[in-house]
Structure formats: C-alpha cells, structure tokens
Image (cartoon, helix red, strand yellow):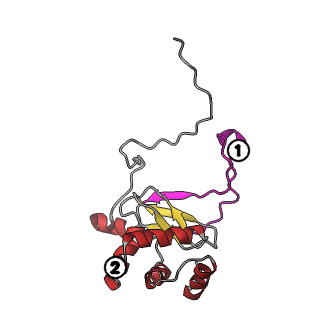
Amino acid sequence: MKDMPGLVQLFKQNGYRITPQRQHIFKILQSHSAHPSAEEIYREAVRDMSSLSLQTVYRTLGELVDLGELDSLDLGTGMLRYDPNVKVPHHHLVCRSCGRVDDLYVDMGQLILPDEFKQGFQVDSSEVVFRGICKDCLDDRSGGSYQPTANLHHPRGSTHKPVVKKNTPTKKKRR
C-alpha cells in the first residue's frame, strides 16, 4: 500500500474527496501489520475521531480495494480482512482459535489447476491458506503444552475431509 501522500494523490486523481476521516483510516491501515477487519479499524479510529462512521470505513476500504491498494480476504474467520500487502506475492497462516492472520512468504512454485478441475472458471490467481493454532494461542492453552490432534475438525462441526470433485453431470430422475 502506498504511503499517506501517495494515497492522497491517488484518491484525488480518481475523483475522491480527501477527508480527515479517510486520512485517519489511511493512517490506521499503515500502522497495522496484521490483516484488520473493517470493524477493527472502526473501533480503533473512533477512539480519536468520534465523527467517523462504520459506513465511511467500509466505503473507504472498498475504494482502496478498487484502486488496487488493498486486497479483501475471506479466510473463513467470520469477517472480511484487509491486506495492504498487495505488491509481494504471498500466502496466509490463519489461527483457528483467535482468527489471527499472518503473511507467509514461501515459494510454492506456480500453482496450476488442471483444465478438468476448473468447472468452467477462468482462474487468474491462486492462494494457499494454512490453518492451525498460532504460537500465542498455543502458549495460552495448558501453559504451552497444547498438542494439536491429527483429527482436525471443520469450523462447522464436521470432520474435514478434502474432496476434489470433477464437474460431472447428475442423472435426472425419470417421472
């Protein structure tokens, strides 16, 4: 993500007004190393600027995504997260316990989805998300003696069993 003067210039070039509220949101985003949600940004911003609305935060984040300065991430944590790291390709680590999201810089080669699995999609990017328990949560559980089990569970309760399905037509029942 650009620095404050760069964001101000980008917004002006694209016909957006530069308000103190937007500048405050820019400042908060630049001070975050995590992947904050709109609600987290709002809670932090409203402490210093009570005139700021959650709608303004959402609108500004959407504009930053549209301008290519942020990525919006749906990582299954129950809320969209915003990633200002749009210049360097990377993957993510997601904590199942607290929802923490960290960047992961590891070269996994070029991930290519074979044509028979595309299901009509034109794939233009890929990302790998690793889920587990972060160090802080591990340390909090049983004084650091937490041992993850091999039988991981899906957040909705069913055991996670990765399935790759081919796009096969279903048979129609006769009437």
Amino acid at circle 2: Val
- Which residue is outermost to the left? 142
Q: Residues within 10 Å of mark 1 (few under 14, many from 20)?
A: few
Horizontal placement of 3 versus 27: left or right? right
Amino acid at circle 1: Pro
Horizontal placement of 52 versus 14: left or right? left
Span of residues in magenta: 103-132
Horizontal placement of 149 versus 22: left or right? left
Residue 151 vertical placement versus 88 (above, below): above
> How far from the left and from the top, in percent, is residue 78?
39, 57
Q: Quadrant of the N terminus?
A: bottom right
Q: In this figure, what is the number of numbered marks?
A: 2
Magenta span dominant secondary structure: loop
Label placed on residue 114: 1
User: Which residue is drawn at the image coordinates 66% and 45% (left, top)?
Assistant: 121
In this view, the residue in front, 74 or 9, is 9
> How far from the left and from the top, in percent, is residue 72?
52, 64
Tell me whether circle 2 and circle 1 mark residues in contact (CB < 8 Å): no
> How far from the left and from the top, in percent, is residue 51?
34, 80
Label placed on residue 46: 2
| Quarter where residue 80 is shown | bottom left
In this view, the residue in front, 106 or 118, is 118
> How far from the left and from the top, in percent, is residue 32?
46, 78
Q: Residues within 10 Å of mark 2 (few under 14, many from 20)?
A: some
Dot 1 falls on a residue whose secondary structure is loop
